[in-house]
Amino acid sequence: MNAQGSISVVEPVGKAFDWTLQVLFRPLDPGKWFTIGFCAWLAFFGESGGGGFHIPGGGGHGRHGGGAGGVRAEVERAHDYLMTNLYWIIPVVVVLILVTIAFMVLFTWLSSRGKFMFLHCVAQNKAEVRAPWSQYGQLGNSLFRFRVVLVLLCLPAILPVLGLVAFAFFRLFMHSKPDVGLILLLVGSLLLFLIFVIVFWVVKKIIEDFLIPIMYAREFLWREGWREAVSLISTNLGIFVLYFLFQIVLGMATGIIVVAVILFTCCIAGCLMLIPYIGTVLLLPVLVFYRAYSAFFLAQFGPQYDVFAVPK
């Protein structure tokens, strides 16, 4: 393992940029783009949302008028309607929840397989779908089980916090006068929620940037891969903290570039990015760069972590 002082978070940027050019532009092959784009789309399947637009209503002219008082009256009326129709609302909600859970499980399984397919395409500079789907089936299924267990462990922690946020906000909204206790409860629960968001983001980055490449390079299942990733991070904590901070900088820079492209194309590119799969193909240089960047960073810790040297 390399000494921490010899690890750089900046040097992999140039390597990842050159590798992105090598994979996607040398030569420029539309068929290769769409094939790798499909693997990338599958890798992030169900993670980026549907992108639906919310069109505000025109605002009714009920007898209660506008303002907060009228809104409170509408909320109370909705509450009364809900309580009197629980006999059919509860079964419908239960069915919707079960269907949503089923789709989330399916999306998680597909994306777990897709993440290894996408890494394979980037690391090997190949545009393949069928071969990596079969070849990394065991690793993908192992990652799927880990992600499901992780969600089951996280939900009992995050749901009460969200419940506190909703309760405090609702009570403040229904009160005509500010309540110091409710305000403190809302602020405290929001801060706690923010802490959870940061922790979840770090865990997601560990899985995406380190666990998956370690499983790929060393053919580990998730238990061995997770232990290896945690051990590597704890031994080199300083450089990994710098890595996570640098990821925020990269994200800001990438966001500026994407927004600039959208504005330069008079929002045409932005509209196309909302289309499933097509949007992934358009953003493929960004996705390949990020996948290559984390892989080049990890490879600095030893040849056993170099996904580009894995013979396939």
Image (cartoon, rainbow, N blue to C red):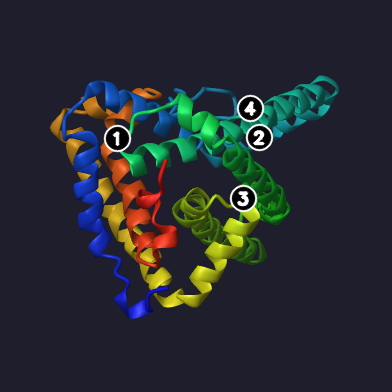
Type of amino acid under label 1: Leu
Residue drawn 30% across the image and 66% down it: 9
Q: Is residue 16 above or below residue 298?
A: above
Image-quadrant location for residue 192: bottom right
Task: Give the Cα distance between marks 1 and 4.
Answer: 25 Å
Q: In the rendering, at what x and y percent does residue 302 appear?
A: 40, 66
* Mark with earlier residue (3, 2): 2
Residue drawn 20% across the image and 56% down it: 14
Q: Are marks 3 and 4 in contact (CB under 8 Å)?
A: no
Residue drawn 62% across the image and 29% down it: 106
Task: Give the Cα distance between marks 2 and 4.
Answer: 31 Å
Residue drawn 86% across the image and 22% down it: 87
Q: Nearer the viewer, mark 3 or mark 1?
A: 3
Q: Is residue 188 visible?
A: yes
- The residue singled out by tag 3 in the image is 221
Q: Is residue 259 visible?
A: no
- The residue singled out by tag 2 in the image is 75
- The residue singled out by tag 4 in the image is 103
* Mark with earlier residue (1, 2): 2
Mark 4 closeness class: few <14, some 14–19, many ≥20 residues within 10 Å: few
* Mark with earlier residue (3, 1): 3
Type of amino acid under label 3: Leu
Q: In the rendering, at what x and y percent does residue 78 appear?
A: 69, 29
Type of amino acid under label 4: Phe
Task: Give the Cα distance between marks 3 and 4.
Answer: 24 Å
Q: Which mark is residue 283?
A: 1
Q: Is residue 149 above or below residue 103?
A: below
Type of amino acid under label 2: Val
Secondary structure of the residue carrying numbered label 2: helix
